[in-house]
Amino acid sequence: MRSLKRFFRKKKPQTSATPADKPNWGDIVATLYDKGLDAFNCEVVRVIYSEDRSIRYVILKDEAGRYTYEIEAIYQWYDDEWGYHCADDGVLPAQWEPFHGRIGNSFFDNEPDLLRELTAEPEYIRYFYPPAEK
């Protein structure tokens, strides 16, 4: 009987965040700086950020001593997602995710070889080089 009462009782109304509560992009980027690096299952050797700090390369070293890297970008949630997820304190309206869903890269024996490959990527050239002087 107790379980039936629990099943039919009125639920507390859930509070939800509104788009007006959403922090601005600059605050989001500043808050997410260096966040989420503990999610990798390898040692984080270095993190290279784009000029606006919304895209990053994370250089990793596995237990065998091989190097690899991942490119991530901050993806902001839509207003309806923000209202649902961010009602809890401390939850941000954005998160680091693989850049355009790109996961997995080659392995390298040393960091200089990795950096040579990384800096030749179109994403690096587009987002990480200083802007061209006009």
Image: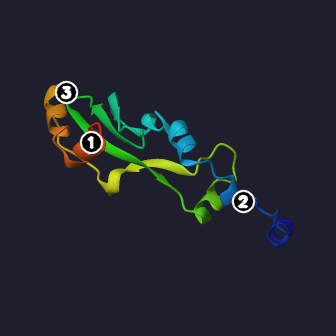
Q: CA distance from mark 1 to mark 3?
A: 33 Å
Q: CA distance from mark 3 to mark 2?
A: 45 Å
41 over 15 or under it: above or below: above
Q: Of callouts 2 and 1, which one flags the residue occurring earlier in the amino acid sequence?
A: 2
Q: Which residue in the structure is indicated by mark 3?
A: 111
Q: Residue furthest front?
A: 134
Q: Mark 1, mark 3: which one is toward the viewer?
A: 1
Q: Of callouts 1 and 3, which one flags the residue occurring earlier in the amino acid sequence?
A: 3
Q: Is residue 30 left or right of residue 43?
A: right
Give 63 or 104, whichever is nearer the viewer. Answer: 104
Q: Position of residue 63 (x, y in %)?
A: 26, 28
Q: Is residue 118 left or right of residue 96?
A: left
**Element carrying mark 1:** loop
Q: Position of residue 67 (x, y in %)?
A: 22, 32
Q: Position of residue 18 (x, y in %)?
A: 70, 59
Q: Position of residue 29 (x, y in %)?
A: 50, 41
Name the kind of residue labelled 3 in the image: Glu
Q: Mark 2, mark 1: which one is toward the viewer?
A: 1
The answer to whether residue 76 of the structure is visible from this angle is yes
Q: Which mark is residue 16?
A: 2
Q: Is residue 28 left or right of residue 96?
A: right
**Element carrying mark 3:** helix
Q: Which mark is residue 82?
A: none
Verify CB contact (< 8 Å) between mark 2 and mark 1.
no
Give 39 or 26, whichever is nearer the viewer. Answer: 26
Q: Which residue in the structure is indicated by mark 1?
A: 134
Q: Of callouts 3 and 2, which one flags the residue occurring earlier in the amino acid sequence?
A: 2
Give 26 or 39, whichever is nearer the viewer. Answer: 26
What residue is drawn where x is 69% and y is 49%? 88
The answer to whether residue 110 of the structure is visible from this angle is no
Name the kind of residue labelled 2 in the image: Ser
